[in-house]
Amino acid sequence: MSASPIHRRTLAGLAKGLKQREFSSVEVARAFLDRLESSQPDLNAFVTVTRDAALASAAVADRRLAAGEGGPLTGLPLAHKDIFCTEGVLTSCGSKMLANFVSPYDATVVARLREAGTVMLGKANMDEFAMGSSNETSHFGPVRNPWDVARVPGGSSGGSAAAVAARVAPAATATDTGGSIRQPAALCGVTGIKPTYGRVSRYGMIAFASSLDQGGLITISAEDAALLLGAIAGFDPRDSTSVDTPVPDYAATLGEPLAGLRIGLVREFFDKGLDARCEARIREALAVYEKLGAKLVEVSCPNLPLSVPTYYVVAPAECSSNLARFDGVRFGHRCEQPRNLADLYRRSRGEGFGAEVKRRIMTGTYVLSAGYYDAYYLKAQRVRQLISADFARAFGECDVLVGPTSPTPAFPLGAKTSDPITMYLNDIYTIGANLAGLPGMSIPCGFVDGLPVGLQLVGPHFSEARMLNVAHRYQTETDWHLQVPAAYA
Ligand code: GLN
């Protein structure tokens, strides 16, 4: 039997091939760059392709590997979501506002992965400023789902998810403020992990809603996620919310048995909004876990149905404050011939931001305004506490929560763009984890009409090692995560 082609390998498989000199890092980078470039007209998963720099860093990696140097990630290619600052490379955040912004420094996530020897293939397309659930708000045009190019890949990390699903990149960084790693991972049939708030540095990750934003990964498998998470997690003095707790060896515990694991089924997750065919896939996955020795317990998080309205007060409030820095003065888009300072601000922002970003800034400014602050923002913060308390109570009865990631499979492009509320409801199952700062994952668990379905795992704070173990054991029993869309096989 011939070995699988380069693009069909997981990161772990590529690392093995590099070590055994089956191929060089330059060959690997070239294979992915060629696929990536030819996928662009259909998928539009990238804003920037960094071919020359990728081949140069792959050549450096090859020299290190030949000298017997380098670590487990040396020479492995990946993509970075265009929300992460990359020195000397356009960092657009999916916005016209930053369509001319070449970052003078690397985000900590980017720097750590670079130091670990990975090779950046390019910058992945995304919803503008990470606001969206379908990747249709990008200034650079929508990303398309490789399983059906008439459908959305999910958002906001749609470029990262589509790239991994089509195997035009074997892994990608991503960010999750209300579901933007897990939801696109689910809709594209790949593995996504949003770590605990504070586990991964936000330095150099363009801020949307600072109390919710968390960097993470989209990969083929939980094993690959474990490999990369070890490199990006850990304290960073440049992010005051980064937590100083030791980073475990995530790969070491992947194979632990699941006997006795208590899986919590959140009653509120299995509501009437959940597509019945998706629910069937989730129940089949739960049966796999039972076979592995896990016990299912029903738990309730009664305040969870309030997570969408709570989030859509808190996130816009924080975004209205974070995005105030884009004023046309220091960096980013500046209008032509401003008449005075107010005109400069007004027109630069009016021209630079798209409709969804403006909607969020207006909502956020409103809920923070004198007279409405108590009624909206403060109320939302109180409900947020109740939601956190619900999770804490649930984790008294179980070790991990398992349920759907998204209420439906990928929907057609344009289907929800005219109705923001319908769009926001896509996030119903993912937002709770962000409000409570909990880690979450989505792993592929089957198909509905040829479209992938995601299984969501949510764990207690800093339980990434256990969650990766729970995901990995499922992936040793099933091969949903190894399925590739026919057009990209
Ligand atoms: N879909 C959510 C929103 O539009 C979440 C986005 C995210 O996680 N970045 O805000």
Image (tube, rainbow, N blue to C red):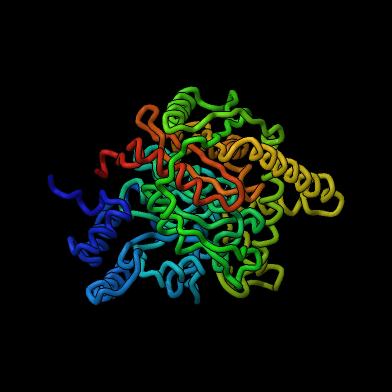
Question: Residue 140 in the image: x percent, y percent?
Answer: 44, 55
Left or right: where 250 falls relative to 54: right
Tell me what residue is drawn at x 46 percent, y 71 percent. Answer: 111
Q: Is residue 119 visible?
A: no
Question: Residue 2 in the image: x percent, y percent?
Answer: 13, 48
Above-or-below relation of 157 to 400: below
Left or right: where 6 falls relative to 307: left
Above-or-below relation of 349 to 270: below
Left or right: where 173 falls relative to 339: left
Tell me what residue is drawn at x 43 percent, y 26 percent. Answer: 284
Above-or-below relation of 107 to 149: below
Q: Nearer the viewer, residue 442 or 322?
A: 442
Tell me what residue is drawn at x 54 percent, y 27 percent. Answer: 274
Above-or-below relation of 387 to 248: above
**What is the quadrant of the N terminus in the image?**
top left
The tally of labels here is 0
Question: Residue 394 in the image: x percent, y percent?
Answer: 65, 37
Q: Residue furthest left?
A: 1
Tell me what residue is drawn at x 51 percent, y 39 percent. Answer: 456
Q: Is residue 436 visible?
A: yes
Q: Nearer the viewer, residue 318 or 109?
A: 109
Left or right: where 69 falls relative to 306: left
Question: Residue 65 in the image: x percent, y percent?
Answer: 26, 72
**What is the quadrant of the C terminus in the image?**
top left
Q: Nearer the viewer, residue 86 or 438?
A: 438
